């Protein structure tokens, strides 16, 4: 991911071009494609001095898949890119010409750049989201589950408590006619 220095968010480039940040709406799921095409066009047309960073705000999310922890990226704002650029007619036309781009945020004729406070808050949020890993909690209290791993395999129980920070669940199962609480990892259970 690009460096997220807050100090140069509205930097000056050669020729006194002041970069501003614009929000671009894309078709959902096309953010990465639009970013790659835009980077290619910038290079081909030698417009590196008119563009800065292109950011897709994401966070790291841990999911349990087939008993294994998988870290994947999840978009914070699906369907949106944030682009640092000189907002002249040529650059605006270039971005709007890309397949998958629907529009800039702002009025039809003149997109509205983000304020310094908005971009600083966004960059901090993106940096924090990238650094921290969020665990998706696959179970809720009262949910019926089946044990798929360990000595209680194939037992059916009810979730009593969820411990997201430890990725564990307290499940009530019936053993020899008695309800017994057992603590299991997220990866050892499957929802019914």
Image: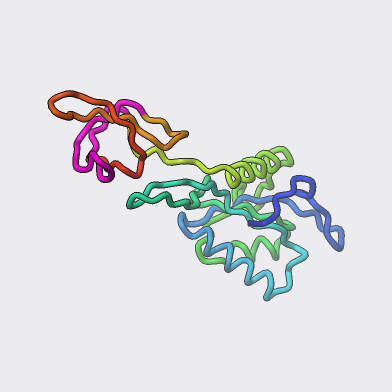
Q: Residue at x 75, y 63 (%)?
A: 50
- 163 on left or right of 158: right
Q: Residue furthest left?
A: 177
Above or below: residue 35 compared with residue 138: below
Above or below: residue 49 compared with residue 120: below
- Asked whether 9 falls inside the magenta stretch, the response is no
Q: Residue 178 placed where, x, y %?
A: 17, 23
- Asked whether 158 falls inside the magenta stretch, the response is yes
Q: Residue 40 placed where, x, y %?
A: 63, 71
- 144 on left or right of 109: left
Q: Residue at x 19, y 36 (%)?
A: 156
Q: Which residues are magenta?
A: 141-161
Q: Residue 1 placed where, x, y %?
A: 63, 56
Q: Residue at x 58, y 49 (%)?
A: 57
Q: Residue furthest bottom?
A: 44
Q: 55 and 60: which one is in front?
A: 60
Q: Residue furthest right?
A: 15
């Amino acid at each position: 991911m690009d460096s997220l220095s807050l100090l140069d968010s509205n930097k000056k480039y050669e020729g006194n071009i002041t970069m501003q940040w614009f929000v671009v709406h894309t078709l959902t799921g096309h953010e990465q494609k639009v970013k790659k095409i835009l980077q290619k066009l910038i290079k081909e047309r030698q417009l590196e001095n008119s563009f800065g960073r292109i950011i897709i705000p994401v966070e790291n999310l841990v999911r349990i898949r087939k008993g294994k922890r998988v870290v994947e990226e999840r978009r914070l704002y699906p369907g949106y890119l944030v682009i640092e650029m000189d907002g002249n007619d040529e650059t605006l036309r270039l971005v709007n010409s890309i397949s998958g781009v629907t529009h800039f945020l702002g009025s039809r004729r003149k997109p509205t750049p983000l304020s310094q406070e908005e971009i600083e808050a966004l960059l901090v949020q993106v940096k924090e989201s990238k650094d921290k890993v969020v665990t998706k909690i696959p179970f809720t209290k009262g949910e019926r589950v089946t044990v798929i791993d360990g000595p209680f395999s194939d037992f059916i129980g009810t979730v009593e408590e969820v411990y997201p920070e430890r990725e564990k669940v307290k499940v009530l199962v019936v053993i020899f006619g008695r309800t017994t609480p057992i603590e299991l990892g997220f990866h050892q259970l499957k929802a019914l």
